[in-house]
Image (cartoon, coloured by chain):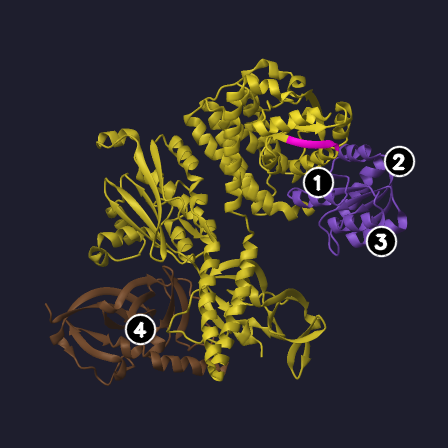
Amino acid sequence: MDTMEYIDMFLDESREHLQAVNDHLLVLEKNPSEVSLVNEIFRSAHTLKGMAATMQFEDIASLTHQMENVLDLIRNEKLSVTTEVIDITFEAVESLEKMVEDISRDGTGKKDVSHLVSRLEQIEKGSSPETNNPAQKQPPSSASFDISLDEYQGTVVNQAKEQGYQAIQLNISLKEDCVLKAARVFMVFEVLEEAGEVIKAVPSVEELEQEEFDRNFSVILLTEEKKEVVLEKILKVSEVEEVTTASFTPAKEESENSEKTSNESESENESAEQSQQRSSKTIRVNLERIDGLMNLFEEMVIDRGRLEDLSQKIGNKDLSETVEHLARISQDMQGMMLTMRMVPVEQVFNRFPRMVRGLAKDLNKEIELEIIGAETELDRTVVDEIGDPLVHLIRNSIDHGIETPEKRKEQGKTEAGTLTLRAYHSGNSVFIEIEDDGAGINREKVMDKAIANGLLTRDRAEQLTKDKIENLIFSSGFSTAETVSDISGRGVGLDVVRSKIESLGGQIAVESEPGRGSKFSIQLPLTLSILSVLLVKVADEIYGVPLSSIEETVLLNKEHIKYIQKNPVMDFRGKVIPVVSLAEILNTPGNEAADSSVKPVVVVKKGEKMAGLVVDSFIGQKEVVLKSLGSYLQDIFAISGATILGDGGVSLIIDPNALIK
Amino acid sequence: MENTIKVIVFQLHNEQYGVNIQQVRSIEKLLNVTPVPGTADFIKGVINLRGDITPIIDLKDRLQIGKTEYTDHTRVLIINIESIQMGLIVDNATDVLDIEQSIIDAPPEVIGGVTEEYLSGVAKIDDRLLILLDLERILNFQELNEVEKAAAKQL
Amino acid sequence: MARVLVTDDAAFMRMQLKNILTGLGHEVVGEAENGKVSVELYEELRPDLVTMDITMPEMNGVEAVKEIKKIDDKAKIIMCSAMGQQGMVVEAIQSGAKDFIVKPFTPERIAEAVGKLF
């Protein structure tokens, strides 16, 4: 269905709201009386519910709905914030995250949330019997806002009144299931502005446009028309549930509360300014657009090369100076474009406080999490990929590093362990460190295990330095189910973490002091030469074909392969183009896929020329880090480099230009 | 002790060979090698060595004394020469030995099927013979690049 | 009862809308799979109401609203939007669309939207 088009936006926004809920919950746990936090959480849950319902993710909708009910009681002070409430909300958020992630992996987003829903229901019912009556829940809280005007607005109202206009306060409630609230508000304002002039809105017009309101808003309208007429017109707008009116007489209120008024309007101004600042400083740009820009830029760089050649040949001084200047500018441009892809590592770090809290609770440990340098920026691709390895390392530190409070006390340490997550720039690298003050790595055990698994001989082991022994835990073949680096029964070894980091062009090392703790350091390149490729399978190998040279992928019926002077060709959009078997030309070892009558073909282009590359199957599109094969293997035919895939394997990147004659 | 050198001892067929430990970065198990098309036969491909793309060659094939059958004992010697890192496939890496310079003799014309040009000497320890290889010669890059290009042209 | 022209590039959505509208007692007099066809059919059929999807090939819904309004400035058009198309919806309303509904559609919501126009 066409809701799929909006799935990315749904995912982005859902993640943002879940993160917001998460952050607010953590603060709320420490300040249970902060109702404003509950409001924030309520708003996020509400938005999520609306979005999920539209996208027909019913489990998310039902869970958020029930969360909303409980939160509503809290913000109306019918229920207080207890550990139970916090815990279950955390659990709910976790389930929501799982569902959202499932959706992002093309899953259904379904999950059995009935136990959570029923526990939330219990909390809801247990707390306040009167809410058992559903009829009482239904009517909208047609909350009207107290509106106060500043001096100027007050004068406008008074003058207007003298001229026979009347000032009406309208309190408008949208229906609960109204989705595009800002558009609806726009329609209401169209009606209002036809009838008169809106001189004030609460929340402010900006906030309304940003959907920073629940479902109620109030305006003051100067109009010649009668209240009832205006009312009727507004009710003509769909999804408006209720409108109430009140005549507005500012003068009196103003004199009574002049001080309060000015205070309030000041703080209002401030918040308006803040939101304005926020909106002017950053814009959200689709990564695809930046990549598109990069691709265009690459093309320009090629032309720049041609220009450089030409200017050398022609030998005109003005021309060569201009070309040199162009070269410098494009260098700077490249730098800027790379920084456009940079995002703060905060996006990943954000999810850790709750995770640490949960793990500590499960394992009966006390852990203080310290996050330093969350603002450090990294390439977006790295930020997207680095989460899992970090989760792994943090779990590792909590599970195996930090001791129980009793044990720590025995050893004269503080009962609460400290886990420090640190990010910083240095040179052309970004470092991320995970440091704990726990038990450290048991070198003897590591060494024994490594010898037992045949990673090294006893003789060789004795020659190894401390560092080298510790770093053995990253070796593939080191971890098995019962080793020290097995992570909480997940059966995944640290070698997986290592290959993930290497696939991002980074490195990982560990330092440890027995009894004092360990520090895992990850070094990542600041920027990457990132390439979007289509991964294809050919016999036993996986190759990457740069997206920039792909015209299309097609499934070619074998019968449609024709021969011109024994050379296979195919018809592609009315053009006859050569067909090349990648397996043959690259002499790929292994068994070809079963001989089927339909062959996947990647149509590549070089200028106007095209060729069809026959492969065994398409795997999918991926952004990879391009690496050179090194000076030992130079000028390899049809290969422009290699990349390390997530599983640690090496894939070669095809240079299609070499295959088009 | 300046008259001794440390060598890593490994096996090719039934002979024992040694290379200077200073040229060896690590010893690895043979894992997923990605073949690179259009290269000489003895170049088996590339591996991911802690994030570095590292070419792997079959040392026996390079020395023209046969090809390696892979077994559980097959190891890759990662060597660093002139800032180039690469892996040599050997049958088994067994030992690290200190060898006195004085027991190293000049290489005979052919030993174990390997011609003199690739050898730097022979050491007799107890009753076994250790053949010391001249890695720089073996990995003569210029020559290799020509080999590759020739191979690529055949394609 | 209104004579309705349904515009959506997805046949499934057209079918769903048709079912709901027919169920409400209206008559679907035409179906268009894009904005361009919708404009042509509007001229030919002069329906009482047009439902207009936003994202469509050839001509999108907002463009189509502008074109239809040129032909008949009294045309009644309801936009069919999805989440996240707030900007497009606002532009359509500014261009003269009367209301909008958000997918997934419910018969109640459609009944409300159509009811408020007649």
- Chain in brown on the image: B
Which residue matches tag 4?
A: B13
- Chain in yellow on the image: A
Is disc 1 in contact with disc 4, using a CB cutoff of under 8 Å? no
Residue at left offset 31%, top offset 56% = A454
Residue at left offset 55%, top offset 60% = A293
Q: Is residue A196 magenta?
A: yes
Looking at the rendering, the stretch of residues picked out in magenta corresponds to A195-199
The percent coordinates of residue A526 (x first, y second) are: 40, 56
Residue at left offset 36%, top offset 58% = A428
- At label 4, which amino acid type do we have? His
Subunit under mark 3: C
Q: Residues within 10 Å of mark 3 (few under 14, many from 20)?
A: some
Q: CA distance from mark 1 to mark 3?
A: 25 Å
Query: Is A276 situated left or right of B91 in this image?
Result: right
Which residue matches tag 3?
A: C40
Q: Nearer the viewer, residue A650 or A520?
A: A520
Mark 3 and mark 2 lie on one chain; the one further toward the N terminus is 2
Query: Is B8 situated left or right of A329 in this image?
Result: left
Asked whether the residues under marks 3 and 2 belong to the same chain, the reply is yes
